[in-house]
Image (spheres, rainbow, N blue to C red):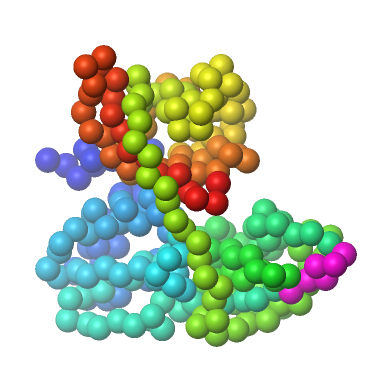
Amino acid sequence: MSVFEHFRKEEYAFVEQALEWKDTVETKFERKLTDFLDPREQDILSSVVGKDETVYLSFWGGSAECERKRALLYPFYEEVSNEDFDLSLFQVTYPVKFVTLEHPDVLGSLTGLGLKRGKYGDILKGNGLFQFVVAEEVALYIEINLQQIGKATVQTERISVENMLPVQEDWEEIHTTTPSFRLDKMIAEMYHLSRSKALPYIEKGRVKVNWRTIDRPAFTLQPGDYVSVRGQGRRKLMETMGQTKKERFKIKYGKKKDS
């Protein structure tokens, strides 16, 4: 059985990359440190590496609760620590009395510096400040160039990763049923919308599955998929559990408690 049979076609490119990383460690006995991966990519990489006896795999993003993490693949005989993931933590302060900043403002400013999304991880908000973790190789560039976020002039400083704000990643588990695993039907069920109201979100590109925009209502969800609707929070299809007597599918999904 081919490893690709477990994944969607749109995920094949990342699966091939994961196989290449694993092969490099197996044949050259060299470590491979990746960019930041989203949770779906982490799941795929974990599946590809599996319980290999020669290649070990670890993830770290600054804390165990971080969503985006770098992966480190390494030979079985080596030991690794958090320092091996080459992370830097930045803290950004701004005049909170005069301006309001949100997560998308920080994300937009980092993107505006020309940074790929894989070069920085979680963005955390505190009282009058933001923190974000980045790959060490881009830290100096950010330190020099990040002087403004939105319309606010900001103060940026590098601090110890030990001082990272707590990450809130709690999921409420919900059991329900659905007539179909089509994206439009699942959006309607998980967000308590009518199908007619769910469709515009999809067709206008406001729905992401595993951090990728999906505009096809007939797209089929699978267990492990992360779903987000712009402005409506995030869900995760955790498990399917057979059918009811009325031939509806029994499912368990997660809802982020802050959404």
Point 66% across, 57% down: residue = 103
Place of residue 55 in the rendered image (x, y in percent of width and height, measured from the top left): 19, 69
Place of residue 178 in the rendered image (x, y in percent of width and height, measured from the top left): 36, 24
Does 60 appear above or below 200? Answer: below
Give the magenta part as a residue range. 93-98
Place of residue 218 in the rendered image (x, y in percent of width and height, measured from the top left): 42, 21
Q: Is residue 192 left or right of residue 142?
A: left
Quadrant of the rendering where the N terminus is positioned: top left
Residue 119: in sight, yes or no?
no
Q: Is residue 210 left or right of residue 78?
A: right
Label total for image: 0
Does 28 appear above or below 209? Answer: below
Point 42% across, 48% down: residue = 172
- Residue 95 is inside the magenta segment: yes
Front one among 39 and 141: 39
- Residue 67 is inside the magenta segment: no
Residue 100: in sight, yes or no?
yes
Does 84 appear above or below 114? Answer: below
Place of residue 186 in the rendered image (x, y in percent of width and height, measured from the top left): 42, 28
Front one among 150 and 1: 150
